[in-house]
Image: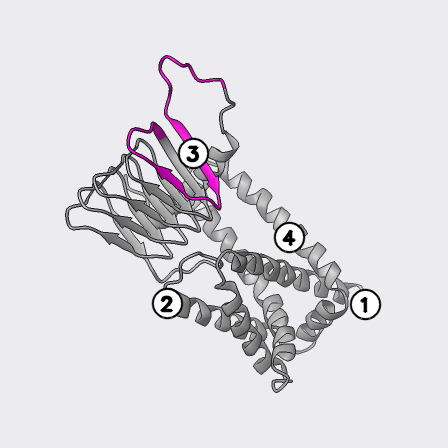
Amino acid sequence: MKTTTAARAVACAAAAILLLMARPLPGRQQAATPAPENRQSWFRSIVVEPGQNVADAVCYFCNVIVRGQLSGDAVALWGSITVAQNATVEGDAVAIGGGAALGAESKVGGDVVALGGSVEKASSATVAEDVESQWWLYFAGQREIYWRGALLFAGVVMVSALLGYGATRGARFSRMTTALATRWGMCVIAGISVALAAGVLYWLLLKIPGAVAWGYATLSFVLFLAALPGFAAVASGLGRRAAPCCPTALPSALCGALVLALTMMLPIAGLAVFGIVALLSWGAVVTAAVARANPA
């Protein structure tokens, strides 16, 4: 039974994290019949040369380049995958926040998935299962910019600020902007608390068979909705500083959202900006709610 592209991408990302945590200790393999090694790397591309015995290759914020044979999966998080001419990947090739390129006479024994990028496939390359390219997805901080996905990403960011403002304009919006301006430290602490609670829920979902795909999607959507009002407040505060000509709440929120969208497109650093904005957004919502429940 084939899984959906989104479910496969989530599963591969989870497998990448588990692979890093389960790295074998040195000296445990037998010298007579060495088992294929698993490779993981942060910020430095993985290159699999001909003759090397490699099972899975997982790269974080970097690229996977296969010139020989890979007996497992190739996964690039915020990076791209290249299967060179005559090279082979026996498992899946999944790029999240990047693209995939298959050279002449290359072979992939599973799926080729590019979330946030394109798939360039030579006519003589063979893929045993599906080829999926979702260019319209764009991930903050991804290392390669695809203009169509980037434009859609900027539009989503600005619409999010508009929706957040429309849902909370008035006294609640003022409480959030005040909290960000005067109690930003409390907002950060509250945002970190929300992120930790969400992390625990994501981890628990991994323990439930068959719950990863729908559970991750549902939880992510809830977190997104919860952050919208706070995001509008963050964007409004930034917009007033970036463009003094927009003193009112809605124009300043849209201006700030555009600035944030452009900043989030910075390679790698954009992901850090996204994380900080998410913490402040959740924190502003929580801090404003507490201030309303416990007025001074």
Q: Check whether the beta carbons of the residues at disc 3 and disc 2 lie within 8 A of each other.
A: no
Mark 4 crowdedness (10 Å alpha carbons): few <14, some 14-19, many ≥20: some
> CA gap, disc 4 to disc 3?
33 Å
Q: Which mark is residue 39?
A: 3
| Pointer 2 or 1: first along the chain | 2
Residue 88 placed where, x, y %?
A: 25, 37
Residue 229, by quadrant, is bottom right
Q: What element does badge 1 sit on?
A: loop
Vertical relation: 70 (above or below) 274: above
Q: Secondary structure at mark 4?
A: helix
Q: Name the spot of residue 234 as percent of width and height, x first.
A: 63, 69
Q: Earlier in the sequence, mark 3 or mark 2?
A: 3
Which of the 4 image quarters holds residue 16? top left
Q: What residue type is disc 2 on?
A: Trp
**Can you identify the residue that label 1 sits on?**
295
Question: Which quadrant is home to the N terminus?
Answer: top left
Give the magenta-colored segment's residue range: 27-54
Q: Which tag, 4 or 1, sits closer to the chain's start? A: 4
Question: Could you give the CA–CA distance between mark 4 and mark 1, rounded to whole angstroms?
Answer: 22 Å
Dot 2 crowding, Cα within 10 Å, few <14, some 14–19, many 20+: few
Residue 36 badge? none
Mark 1 vs mark 3: give the one in front: 3
* Residue that numbered label 2 is attached to: 147
Looking at the rendered image, the disc whose residue lies closer to the viewer, 4 or 3, is: 3
